[in-house]
Amino acid sequence: MKNALSEDESTQLAKTVDDALEWMDAEDRSGEEYKSKLSEVESFCNTLVQKAYQSAGGAGTPGSMPGSMPQEQTNDDTEGPVIDEID
């Protein structure tokens, strides 16, 4: 993931996480405030993950992110061994 991000993006990510942790520790917050902050951090992180996914060649195809499961390839041709029934 780090290789897919620029130096500036890595710095912004670290700052976003640090700021969120400081915000959480600063004072007691309501559940709504936590949800709002979570949405804010997730939105920022999702943007970076999408960029990393696309730079890894994902471009919207599942299974192309490094470390993901390979997609099962189906072969509609009738290649392979043929089994004849014997009575």
Image (cartoon, rainbow, N blue to C red):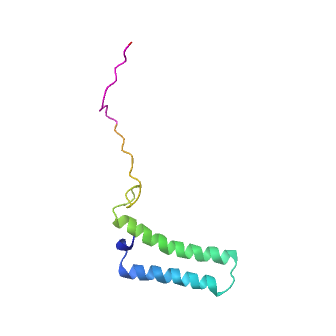
65, 87: nearer the viewer: 87
Which segment is the magenta one? 76-86
The location of residue 52, given as percent across then percent down, is: 39, 68
User: In the image, what residue occupies the spot 69% across and 74% down?
Assistant: 31
Give the image quarter of residue 65. Answer: bottom left
Q: Quadrant of the C terminus?
A: top left
User: In the image, what residue occupies the spot 38% across and 73% down?
Assistant: 2
Q: Quadrant of the N terminus?
A: bottom left
Give the image quarter of residue 33. Answer: bottom right
The location of residue 79, given as percent across then percent down, is: 29, 32
User: In the image, what residue occupies the spot 64% across and 87% down?
Assistant: 26
- Name the dominant secondary structure of the magenta segment: loop
Q: Is residue 61 above or below residue 84?
A: below
The location of residue 3, given as percent across then percent down, is: 35, 72
54, 85: nearer the viewer: 85
User: In the image, what residue occupies the spot 37% across and 57% down?
Assistant: 64
The location of residue 27, given as percent across then percent down, is: 67, 86
Does residue 81 belong to the magenta stretch?
yes
